[in-house]
Image (spheres, helix red, strand yellow):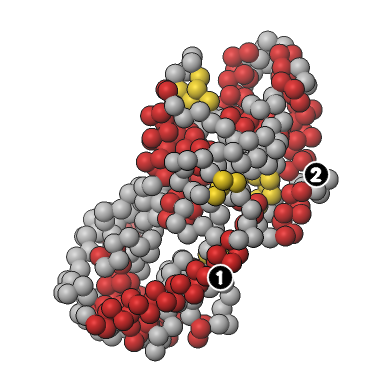
Amino acid sequence: MLQRFAGIAAAAVAFASVATCVFAQDAERKGIAAPPGHVFKTIISGYEFRSKETRALQDDDLENPGFLAVERAADVWKKVEGAAGKSCMSCHEQAETSMKGVGAAMPKWDDKLQKPVNLEQRINICRTEHMKAEPWKFKSQELTDMTTFVRYQSHGMKVSVKTDGPMSPWFERGKQIYYTRYGQLDLACESCHERNNGKFMRADFLSQGQTNGFPTYRLRDQRLVPLHERFEGCMFDVRAEPFKPLSDEFIALELYVAWRGIGLPVETPSVRN
Amino acid sequence: MRRSLVAAFALCLSAGVACAQEPTKTPIKLDIVNDALPNSLTGAPGNAEAGRKVFLTRTLGNCLACHQVTSLKSEEFHGEFGPSLDGVAGRYTEAQLRLIVADPKRIFTDTVMPAFFKNEGLSRVRPEFVGKSILTAAQVEDVIAFLKTLN
């Protein structure tokens, strides 16, 4: 028993020394003060956890590879498609004004569907209902480009999702998913992104898992990655059967995680590892 | 002709047996005594050198993802999730180490460390891992043998 106590004490000392150096790095990570009742004291963008080089790449609009998607979608915005003979522009005119703020406040309640929809879903609703065009597939370049383009119109604006009223059960469902351990590795989102953010995990610092930069240009994938693909990847890596992209579960999780980053500036297209 | 028929039949038979065995993995039961597992999971001691490989291999133990070990300094990227394992053999008995690796939540209820020898009671496990533990009994014993070298 004494031996065990000594063991725990030694482990605690070792842990404390690691924690000290983590806090030293933490001090350099700039964040925003969280509102009362929030899970974090300071809300920190994934940007702050990345290397100087990665941050520089994001900050330079000419070098940031995510801007190729913005440019491609700017052309598609004007392109007439579907049986109704419309483009995005036919209804929404200049995206710079009509789409400003839209991407900062997603997922948003849809009265007709009686559920929250995210940006990808909203774009496809426009295509099928108003343009009478085929919906774009999730993970297709077209859908990810347009999602990036629309969200870019909110660049620098604060993430601000509504979580009350009819959104409330969705928020609670998302929260439940966030704190549930999944897969053979038995890990929850919380295990890494709440409890251990800021710590070194293999070759990388664990972030708070904020979503303000999505779709994000991932250096390892060499392309823009939409949020639900990242959710899928996390679940797959803990050897869990992931929920499907755009499923109710991932929409609920998207809503909840957006709330965890409330007030952060939209960084789309961000650059991450 | 006859021989090939016999061979084909034998193949069907063995494939049938393999298929029948695959889904019915029996749940792992641990013989816990005083927060420890006194008996080797295989009935034999493990091999420290094999355990070192299991410890380092990402698809097996992947222990360095979360822990630091000074004697493995030549390996890159020691994680910070868990405590350093330097001197871990002096802090815990072999029997305690065995339970910590097999199912750490039995001792440290709030830890994020996965159970390496557990095959049920998990949520949404990917089909290819259903009914399987992360490590085999022999691999756990090898890791224990390696941990015992960390004095």
Which residue lies at the image location 32% right of the left edge and 60% below the top edge?
B110
Rendering coords of residue B12 (x, y %)? 30, 57
**Residue that badge 1 annotates:** A21
Q: Are marks 1 and 2 on the same chain?
A: yes
- Local crowd size for mark 2, using a 10 Å CA cut-off: few (<14), some (14–19), many (≥20): few
Judge whether residue B133 can be spotted in this image: no
Residue nearer the viewer, B73 or A207: A207
Which mark lies nearer to you, 1 or 2? 1
Quadrant for the C terminus of chain B, please.
Answer: bottom left
| Secondary element type, mark 2 | loop
Residue A218 locus on image (x, y percent)? 65, 50
Instruction: State which quarter of the image contains the N terminus of chain B.
Output: bottom left
Residue A95 drawn above or below residue A144: above
Give the residue pinned by disc 2.
A61
The amino acid on which the numbered mark 1 sits, given as a three-letter code, is Cys
Q: Is residue A116 above or below residue A138?
A: above
Label 1: state its secondary structure.
helix
Q: CA distance from mark 1 to mark 2?
A: 33 Å
